[in-house]
Amino acid sequence: MASIDVTVRGGGIFGLSIAWACLQRGARVRVIEARTWGAGSSGGLVGALSPHVPEAWNAKKAFQLESLLMAPGWWQAVETASGLPSGYARLGRLQPLPDDRSVQAARRRQDEAAALWRGEAEWRVIAATGAAWEPLTPSGWLVRDTLSARLSPRMGLAALVAALKAGGADLIVGEESDAGAVVHATGMAGLDSLSQDFGAPLGTGVKGQALSLRHDARDQPQLFVDGLHIVPHADGTVAIGSTSEAQWAEDGTDAQLDTLLAKAVAAVPALAAATVIDRWAGIRPRAASRAPLLGAWPGRRGHFVANGGFKIGFGMAPKVAEVMADLVLGGRDAIPADFQLATLVQKSTGRR
């Protein structure tokens, strides 16, 4: 291969997406993954690409909106280049409303969404119909948003790897030297390295667990019930997740998944007969800012960071990839201030 313009370290959703965006711009790209593609938190099951509540608007929510609106075309391009499905579909989301107060709050958000989402999607209060694929709702009302989408994490990563390979990227599992600009998208290990480099806790790990059921609801919207994501996938499975554990004894799955399953069946009785076919646990990197951690690595010329996509990595990936490619290849910095690694370092250490 000719000389490398960009080396991306990390084969999760941020690393592969940034590599793809750089490749699309004509860069010669190398991706180095230490273990296997999606070995970290990106190799999970859930794949819920969902917006924040349309109120109290801020840069993070605006960035996420742009990414979710980009996603259909972005993933279609990956599928076309790879010849593989990603499992992407924008089928919306249903959420139960427990009482009159929540119904009134949701109705106010209808107007907020109409303005903030620029008519590209709706957030609407609807009456429950009693259909099998609806969460039970004490008030008789649901929120339906048409912005939420689903993606199979493992299918999406496989499609990205195949698209990169088809485009001539240098894909390495193991170890290889860096060349050109270097993007570090190495998840929890990378967050630990950053914290050590700057002598301050820039983030932490949060364990998540999820499971997959054999139940075909592939054309139905995802459900969000009391913090639980219930996501139908294109392969005839339904993902349930996830836990958020700040402390844990073991890295693997445990009985908390039985609790998740019980909650899902209570919300959607149609899942009662579904068979569990997979269980997953992983450690997700959460930056101290609770936002994606992006930008140049202070003090390391030619090195950049993309990390901390806690629970929103797949939804943010298209926009993260584009702004990182702009920065790495063209020096154009369109990263929101709250996402900047330099901003977090300054707040955490007092150093510029």
Image: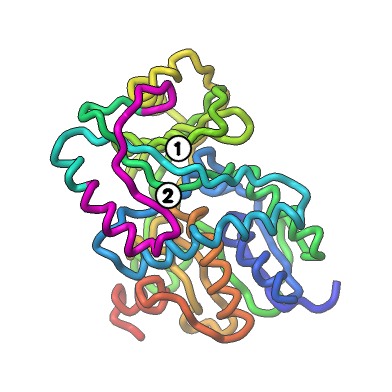
Name the one closer to the observer, 62 or 209: 62
Q: Residue at x 44, y 72 (%)?
A: 197
Q: Residue at x 50, y 42 (%)?
A: 91
Task: Please state the horizontal and vertical placement of residue 43, each as a whole percent of the image.
Answer: 57, 44
* SS at circle 1: strand
Task: Please state the horizontal and vertical placement of residue 107, each as a whole percent of the image.
Answer: 23, 47
Name the one closer to the observer, 180 or 177: 180
Task: Please state the horizontal and vertical placement of residue 346, each as a whole percent of the image.
Answer: 33, 79
Residue 255 seen from this side: no
Magenta residues, as a range? 106-134
For badge 2, the amino acid type reads Ser
Q: Residue at x 27, y 59 (%)?
A: 112
Circle 2 is placed at which residue position? 50
Q: Residue at x 31, y 53 (%)?
A: 53
- Residue 137, compared with residue 300, is above or below; it is above
Circle 1 is placed at which residue position? 222
